Image (tube, coloured by chain):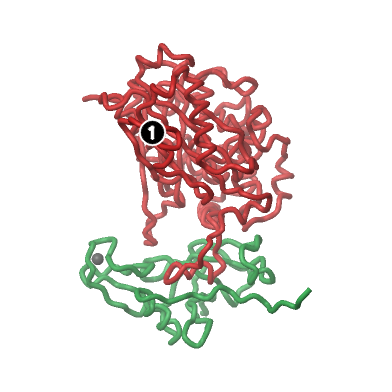
Amino acid sequence: MTTLKGKAAITGLGITPMGKIFGHDAMYFAGEAIRLAVEDAGLTKADIDGLLINNGVGTAGALSLGLAPYLGFDALRVLNHMNAAGSTAAQMVMYASMCIELGMASNVVCVFADAPLQTPGPSAAAYARPTPPRGMASLAPAYGLYSVNAQYALAAQRHMALYGTTNDHLGEIAVSTRMWAERNPRAQMRSPITLEDYHNSRWIMEPFHLLDCCLVSNGAVAVIVSSASRARDLRQPPAYVLGIGQGHHATTNRGGWEPETHTAATIAKDTAFRMAGVELADIDVLELYDCYTYTVLVTLEDYGFCAKGEGGPFVSDGKLRPGGALPTNTGGGELSGYYMWGMTPLSEGIIQARGQGGDRQVEKHDLVMVTGNGGILNYHGCMILSPNAS
Amino acid sequence: MTTQTEPARPAPVPDEVSAPYFEGARDGKLMLMRCLACGAWRFPARDRCDRCWSTETEWAQASGEGTLFSFVLMHQVYHPAFAREVPYNVAVVELAEGIRLTTNIVDCPNEAIHIGMPVQAVFEPVSDTVALPKFRPARG
Ligand SMILES: [Zn+2]
């Protein structure tokens, strides 16, 4: 059987300044990130023959296929505008790796950009829906159900009732993630927080405090995927793609089916770990999609780091913190670092695999697991990165 | 500064596919789509059964009985009409028919809401033509 294991590597990484960066649209940020990634890899514009685009939720200057002419890519072999919500980063790297392994492209750029913040103001307004919905879709606002925050809070509340998960458990994830962000100069939120600060942060909707929820960021991240053989000659230490997979559960509104508490991470894990030929216990660093604290908890369970329902007690000994047994979200994640969908965990995973994490570098980083998550825990991606090709 | 009237809650806007749902609620009935081929209930209303893919559908009256699947207490004001109501609940109810829908729990203080509680549909008029199904604790 053919395999993608170790056939492709991430050779370039470009990260723009993140957060309340005003006066630019998503196209501008994407251009900046791609320029930085090409420079980082030691490649030139002419080396790029693939472009995969993932757009965020902000409307200003939304990314489109127009990114190709904007950057003067006039002879691409591979081009696509991809969307599997927050799991898209893994899908882009997967598609890029397959194209490269099949000889259909050499150096493929994968980019995510978003610019939801266009004027100084409250973040809650940034993602507001401009036109009122009709039909069944008009039920949610009539009941006062607003924001993806509430959908994830419903999932977390369900988990709490089924398994006894508490806000102390979720709070530990907020605290451990912030401790990592303190060590990352790129992170938006670097002031230390305690569990007490977590409990004192305002309710958005119970059971979620403000500190359960991710940031809102303007910015972009671009990565370049190349063949493993090419990667060895380029400027940066390669981050080899050893395993990659995806899994998706639809919300059917049917009894007996709970993607909110039992996610399709199980499916993605099966594919990715089988490809990489590694076991859970081999993983050194975790970069988990953390749109909410709860997302980390349920993801740990669904990968089998602990049994279903035991995610709360599992994290409460501080094992996710710097120096802990399971270093997790070492750049501050989306909760405290920056919110670039699946590019947040992917970018930090690349940095860790390269050994370029500075104050936050995890000493043993042979296997770095990166996840993506989208929808209301519907869409999942998994990547296993390594500084070693096998 | 001018005096402003209290902003109204966003009213549901029936469309062709959802009209029987809202008309049913106005008449005090919880009406849901049911597949004529496989018998599966479904929500929200849409033209095809997600289980067997049939487009042969009827609207049928559901029992209105269910249990609370999950809930949140909204504190942040996303729409000015809810400014005086926070914290208010938003709930997901699993109906006896085996499907879930979003709603509010009424006739029950927020502190008493708990997952697994039996609930019963009630219908709250929004206008002359539209009502919203909500749920109260089941009696008995
Ligand atoms: Zn059917």
Residue A126 lies, in percent from the top left, at 59, 53
Quarter holding residue A252 = bottom left
Query: In the rendered view of the protein, which quadrant contains the N terminus of chain A?
Result: top left
Quadrant for the C terminus of chain A in the image: top left
Task: Tell me the colour chain B is drawn in.
Answer: green
Question: In this view of the protein, which residue sits in the foreground, A75 or A255?
Answer: A75
Number of numbered discs on residues: 1
Q: Nearer the viewer, residue A211 or A278?
A: A211
Q: As displayed, is residue B113 above or below residue A42?
A: below
Q: Amino acid at mark 1?
A: Leu
Q: Please tell me whether residue A173 is drawn above or below residue A376 in the rendered image.
A: above
Label 1 marks a residue whose chain is A
Q: What hue does chain A carry in this figure?
A: red
Residue A265 in the figure: left or right of residue B123: left
Question: In this rendering, would A254 be left or right of B70?
Answer: left
- Looking at the rendered structure, the secondary structure element under dot 1 is strand
| Ligand 1 quadrant in view | bottom left
